Amino acid sequence: MLTVIEDLLSKKEVTQFTQALDKGQWLDGKHTAGSQASKVKYNQQLDDGSALAIELRNTVIRKLSGNALFMSSALPNKIYPPKFNRYQGGEHYGLHVDASVMPIPNSHQMLRTDLSATLFLSEPKTYDGGELSIETQFGLQQIKLNAGSVILYPANSLHQVNPVTKGHRTASFFWIESLVRSNDQRSMLFDLDQSIQALTVELGNNDAEVKRLTGVYHNLMRSWASC
Ligand code: NI
């Protein structure tokens, strides 16, 4: 399941982010790729230790935590501290899969990557290329979202970032360990939750069947969640 979260950041927030990032300290992206990925990775990454990176990633986490669609579709247990990258002048990231388990920086914890996420920060009309190209069971999906919007996709997908041939593409990217590891189970819980939300609007949350379905949702969560 691919999930698009439109306008996680407002236009005003996107402008604040991009103005700040233009002044940021950018490093060669090869420093932070695994040995296999580094052979296909050509981009720049914001210095994770900088005050700017800390401030911006905290804002992204805060916005995610307050977003109902993100919470319902990802069912996050842990979120990797968001990183920031930039592609320009033909830079790209060739076909790869993301690492399955990662140490969370500045902690003794590990994170299993169930979902990968990209938050687009550049408006699509300001650059050419730069699509996030994801191999799915329904074929290749080419993703290029409005600035401020997020794509969530299964972290076991092969994917690449196409060369940016004009302008520059700035984004934030991160991973999520979900309470529900299986993509299929998580997808069913999301559908059920969406239906319960719609029925609650129609029938009210005192309706007996709404209560029963809500109980089913929580019982499935209880069976499937690990934390
Ligand atoms: Ni990747």
Image: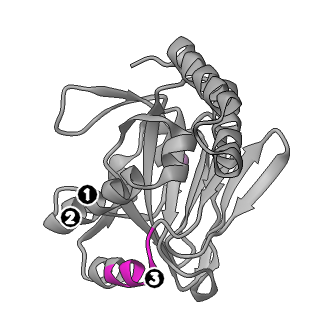
* Residue at figure coordinates x 37%, y 50% from the top left: 65
Q: Which mark is residue 55?
A: 2
Q: Is residue 180 left or right of residue 101?
A: right
Q: Which residue is mark 3?
A: 11
Task: Residue type at mark 1: give it.
Answer: Asn
Q: Position of residue 82 (x, y in %)?
A: 35, 53
Secondary structure under the numbered disc 1 in the rendered image = helix
For the question of whether residue 39 can be seen, the reply is: no
Towards the viewer: 110 or 161: 110
Quadrant for the C terminus in the image: top left
* Residue at figure coordinates x 74%, y 45% from the top left: 135
* Residue at figure coordinates x 57%, y 87% from the top left: 126
Towards the viewer: 92 or 214: 214
**Sequence-earlier tag: 1 or 3:** 3
Task: Residue type at mark 2: give it.
Answer: Glu
Q: Are marks 2 and 1 in contact (CB under 8 Å)?
A: yes
Q: Are marks 1 and 3 in contact (CB under 8 Å)?
A: no
Quadrant for the N terminus in the image: top right
Q: Is residue 175 above or below residue 13?
A: above
Quick one: label 1, few (<14), some, or many (20+) residues within 10 Å?
some
Q: Which mark is residue 58?
A: 1
* Residue at figure coordinates x 49%, y 71% from the top left: 148
Secondary structure under the numbered disc 3 in the rendered image = helix
Alpha carbon of mark 2 to alpha carbon of mark 1: how far? 5 Å
The answer to whether mark 1 is within 8 Å of ligand 1 is no
Alpha carbon of mark 3 to alpha carbon of mark 2: how far? 18 Å
**Span of residues in magenta:** 9-16
Q: Position of residue 175 (x, y in %)?
A: 45, 42
Secondary structure under the numbered disc 2 in the rendered image = helix
